[in-house]
Image: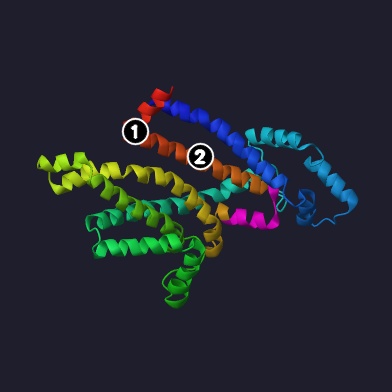
Amino acid sequence: MVSFVLKRLALLVPMLLGASLVIFLMLRLGPSDPAMDYLRLSRIPPTVQALAETRQRLGLDQPLAVQYGVWLNKALHLDFGVSYATGRPVLPDLLHYLPATLHLAGVALALTLGLSIPLGMWAARRRDALPDQIVRGVAFLGVSMPNFWLGFLLVLVFSVELGWLPAMGRGGAEHMIMPAVAIAFMSLSINARLLRASMLEVSGQRHVYYARLRGLSAAKVERAHILRNALLPIITATGMHVGELIGGTLVIESIFGWPGVGRFAVSAIFNRDYPVIQCFTLLMVLIFVLCNLIVDIVYAWADPRIRLAAEGAQ
């Protein structure tokens, strides 16, 4: 298990380097001129002399390889530059807004796992019956409905029409309900369908049949022989859902006025604030990669065949 974890950790370095290169090139090779954007946000007239001085100050007059090397060296020292809009260092501002986003994404993840597993089990137990049809119908809506549209719908119903929940801001639990549901609905729908299909597949396997022949109770067979094996695909899907949930906060935070890093990043995207966009994107990649690393470790712990396959490859 230790060698498996170390191997996965070693793979993080080239993955993050590759991601940093892609992020840098996507922004630098875009149609917009960072020097022009800097002057616009600084409210400085974009004269020829001002543009030349700004390009020199920002290092934009250097070759792309040199620009990337300078940026990567500073990033390794946790220096992501200064925001064009605020004039403040980028990383402290992002870290200031990050806890609110992680709080929202964490509640959405708990909601995803807490609802999708019981719903998937309920549907699998009552295959083709009314509960199964209800779960499949809800799951179909979840995978078909964009989260921003669901967010507007929740505000219309529960804030405007009924007045039950606050439409914007961060406060108590009542402020958390609608944005967390809007972010989690698609992921929990996917998980419920995946668990239903996985449980039905596992329940037809030979070891389950033998467990029933040994006289084990239906509850023990489901818990120890069906659910345990059926949860393995859910573990893999959870790593993907983490990225979806954090990415979903970009729009949802703007809709609900949630003071998180997603709302801060959307403002930077509209302003073409390159240092903020670069730092935010790399931070999200880092979170996503670390979450998938945790999922890989949990999966290997739950299924020894993964560890044996990795050792065999060595």
Dividing the image into 4 quarters, which one contains the N terminus? Answer: top left
Give the side of residue 217 with respect to residue 37, left or right.
Answer: left
Q: Give the number of the disc on residue 289.
A: 2
What is the x, y in percent for residue 126? 22, 58
Residue under pointer 1: 301
Dividing the image into 4 quarters, which one contains the C terminus? Answer: top left
Looking at the image, is 296 positioned above or below residue 237? Answer: above
Specify the farthest residue to the right.
49
**Residue 39 showing in the rendered view:** yes
Looking at the image, is 239 positioned above or below residue 45? Answer: above
Q: Which secondary structure type mostly characterizes the magenta part of the structure?
A: helix
Residue 141 appears in which quarter of the rendering? bottom left
Which residue does the image show at 50% across and 39% down from the upper left?
A: 289
Which residue does the image show at 37% across and 43% down from the upper left?
A: 235
Give the side of residue 163 with respect to residue 207, left or right.
Answer: right
Q: Is residue 266 magenta-colored?
A: yes
Specify the farthest residue to the left.
215
User: What residue range appears in magenta?
Assistant: 263-274
Q: Of 10 and 221, which appears nearest the observer?
A: 221
Three-letter code, disc 1 = Trp
